[in-house]
Amino acid sequence: MAGDQQFSVIREKVANLIPMKITKILITGCNLTSEDEVKDALGIHIGDSIFNFSVKDAQQRLDELPFVDHALLKRQLPNTITIHITERTPFAVWQHNGQFKLIDRQGNIVDDHGMSGKDGKAFLRLPLVVGYGANISAAELLDIISTQPDIKKHVVAAVRVGNRRWNLDLKNGTIVLLPENQELPAIQRLNRLQKDIQLLDRPIKVIDLRLADRLIIQEDKNYMNQSQTNDNTENKDDSNTPPTSTPQNN
């Protein structure tokens, strides 16, 4: 403790004698951790003296950030601070029994240092899997979805059904029913349908792919009813419009 205090005094004297200012803060390794979070934990800013802070204390604050396994912080004289972040690697967010947990590829829960799913921005960058057993089976399905970017961009969540098969919840509210143990051919089929007829952009409530030899689609009745109402309104307005005549040459 005495040694730390003595070094702090020496550091302050050096900072006063050699006023080198920080002009660069270089951060690498961040994926789930934002650079703003790193800079806040660092506690120094561009223009501060490069000597006027404790590397040990700053590194400890960085190590306490959610998702950070460890941080390596260095002064590079005369004006640069370098920080390399090594993160723990959560693979997905698992929702079960009303709680959100980070999981790795094996389905194990990853410590989030008390961060809540509601407040943690990093949660939004990970795929969401829902239901009992979803954590154990998620990696295989998410790997398949990742091979089909035209499908992946539509998916909000993968929901485990009866711990034996999956549904996909899409951004537009459509639910895709996948067959048991046949996710790859089903998603490849869905990708072809999207390319051919833009199926995922249509007002559809359910796309059932559980049978390989047929496609079952349930239309969105609310959309259809609203569309019909709009059509009727337009027809009514048209009926009140007086007819117009087109001049003809005699």
Image (cartoon, rainbow, N blue to C red):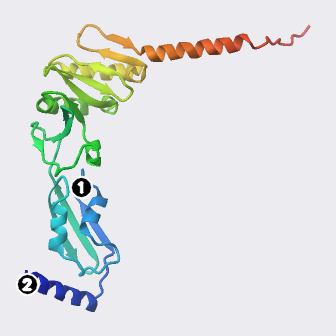
Label 1, on which residue? 30
C-alpha separation, residue under disc 2 versus residue under disc 1: 35 Å
Q: Label 2, secondary structure: give it.
A: helix
Query: Image check: 221 left or right of 119?
Result: right
Q: Residues within 10 Å of mark 2 (few under 14, many from 20)?
A: few
Label 2, on which residue? 2
Compared to residue 234, the image places residue 47 above or below, namely: below
* Circle 1: residue type: Cys
96 or 208: nearer the eye? 96
The percent coordinates of residue 1 (x first, y second) are: 7, 80
Which picture quadrant has residue 243? top right
The percent coordinates of residue 95 (x first, y second) are: 20, 34
**What residue lies at 33% left-to-right and 16% top-to-bottom?**
206
117 or 69: nearer the eye? 117
Instruction: Specify the label residue 196 is tagged with.
Output: none
Tell how many labels: 2
Q: Label 1, secondary structure: give it.
A: loop
Compared to residue 231, the image places residue 115 above or below, namely: below
